[in-house]
Image: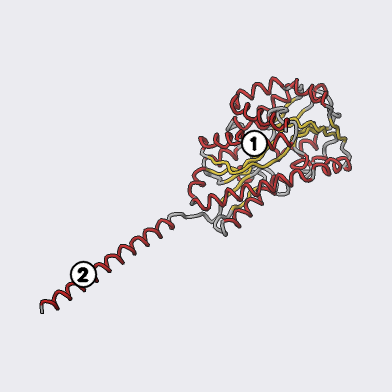
Amino acid sequence: MKKSWLTVLAVALVITLVALMAGCGGKQAQSDKGKAGDVKLKEEYKLTMNVTKETKWGQGAVKFAELAKEYTNGKVNIKVYPSAMLTGGDQMRQVEMVQNGSIDFMVNSTINIAPTIPEFDVWGLPFMFPDYKAVDAAMNSPAADKLFKALDKYNMVGLAWGENGFREVTNNKRPITSPDDMKGLKMRVVTPMYIDIMRALGANAVSMNWGEVFTSLQQGVIDGQENPIVGVIIPTKIYEVQKFITNWHYSYDALAVVVNKNTWNSFPPEIREQLKKAAVDAMKWQVAESRKGLGEGIEFLKSKGMTVTDLTPQQLAAFKQATKPVYDKYAQKVGPEIVKAFEEAVAKAAKN
């Protein structure tokens, strides 16, 4: 009888222990499920850019959105808003709205970022880059990483670099072969550094949002503008309202894929990794597309009646000398350490 009672007690203890273990396991499973459920993705993430989807820049943004959806298995849906639609056409407000989280992503020109984050002006310093080899050396070096680190204090995260391209000058008055040819021209520009460059060359700088440029050129409100050939001049049909173009590679315009830091931190690690890959792959594709049509682009502009001028090294030297004070001024604003890192990358490219 005593043995039977002990047996019953032992069985009861085993059942109790099993129940407790099952309960703990269930609670752990519920806890793990809760953690996974904490991540609530939005149905749509907004991406802004200030060009149309037809430009190489715009195509790169669309490609990023497509790859983001593909790589995350449909979990992250990014809608591309072109022509600065989300900022009422004001291309300079895009940075502010991504910074404060009103917009999630942007594929933006470094020109538009620089007024908020001065370090980004390093890309556009006059005659910093002699060719695309130098650009690639800088873009794939630790020098470029310093710029993305600068985004951190502005509540943003940089994902990848793209390309708008070398900015070439167009106008309706005359071929430009020397700084003297720039004197008196009313030239559309965007930011303070470009205003200073144009003034150093004797031109009258006019700050204007891109959406107003075509009509202003058509009506003679301005004489000229400066932009990349494949990235902007051809897709926006600037050749219809401009007679002359000079290839002077005076300033380079990079693109940056940027996301609001709070949005970024809301993604679990695996999705961050997928989005980073989507941005890098999209911009690699975008850069290749941007450069693919350069040679054909020049011939196309000629076929449309534009006079194309290529400068000799001596002619370029005169422009470089005239804009040296602007280079020095903005190098201080960018930060000597960053400028030195870029100059070293460019010098290294020249040796290889």
Location of residue 283 in the rendering, given as x and y in whole percent from the top left corner? 66, 46
Question: Do tag 1 and tag 2 residues touch (Cβ < 8 Å)?
Answer: no
Which residue corresponds to the image point at 73% horizontal and 36% vertical from the top-left?
A: 133
Q: Residue at x 63, y 47 (%)?
A: 280
* Near-viewer residue (297 or 340): 340
How is the model colour-coded?
Answer: secondary structure
Question: Which residue does the numbered mark 1 point to in the structure image?
Answer: 110
Q: Please tell me which of labels 1 and 2 falls first in the chain.
A: 2
Q: Give amino acid for label 1.
A: Thr
**Dot 1, crowdedness within 10 Å: few (<14), some or many (≥20)?**
many
User: Which quarter of the figure has residue 306?
Assistant: top right
Identity, as a three-letter code, of the amino acid under mark 2: Leu
Tell me: residue 49, above or below residue 26.
above
Give the percent coordinates (x, y) of residue 147: 59, 34
Q: Which residue is mark 2?
A: 13
Element under label 2?
Answer: helix
Task: Name the residue furthest front.
Answer: 3
Where residue 6 sits, quadrant-wise, is bottom left
Left-right relation of 2 to 87? left
Q: How many marks on residues?
A: 2
